[in-house]
Image: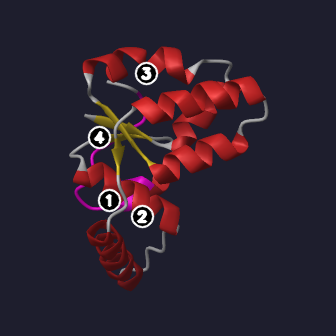
Amino acid sequence: MILVDSSKYISWMRAGRNPLTLLAAHAQAGDLVSCGIVRIEVLRGVVKPNVKEQLSEFFQIVPEVGLTPALLHEAADLAWTLDRRGIVLPVTDLLIGVCAKKANATLITEDPHFQQMPALKVLAELP
């Protein structure tokens, strides 16, 4: 199972690569999940309406790890623990990380913050 962080979507699009093409096989195989924070971060930065529409449709068919009260509590506990170690991460990254852990997914990202989250599987490229 994989969850692709918004940093990866943005990187691909800046390089002229279509995330939908890159992720199609994973989506069809059922080994791709997402979370609402990633959807928001990706869609807010898209300039072209047709690209936004395509990505919106894609996010509608990809299973989403919901931000439940339990996950919000987990993110709060993780933030507290990391803060005590001097590691202060953005709330959005904490939420994406706990969603990936909940789904037992490897997080595909270019954001180094995620390397600081314990027990989170992180890769820079698709497997």
Mark found first going from the N terminus, 1 or 4? 1
Can you give x and y, in whole percent of width and height, for residue 103 in the image? 24, 47
Q: Which residues are magenta?
A: 114-125
Crowding near pointer 1: few (<14 within 10 Å), some, many (20+)?
many
The quadrant of the rendering that contains the N terminus is top left
Mark found first going from the N terminus, 1 or 3? 3
The tag on residue 106 is 4
From mark 2 to mark 4, how far is it between C-alphas? Answer: 15 Å
Circle 1 sits on which residue?
Answer: 98
SS state under label 1: helix
From mark 1 to mark 4, how far is it between C-alphas? Answer: 11 Å
SS state under label 2: helix
Work out whether 75 lies above or below 31: below
The tag on residue 23 is 3
Left or right position of 9 against 71 = right
Circle 2 sits on which residue?
Answer: 94
Q: Is residue 65 magenta?
A: no
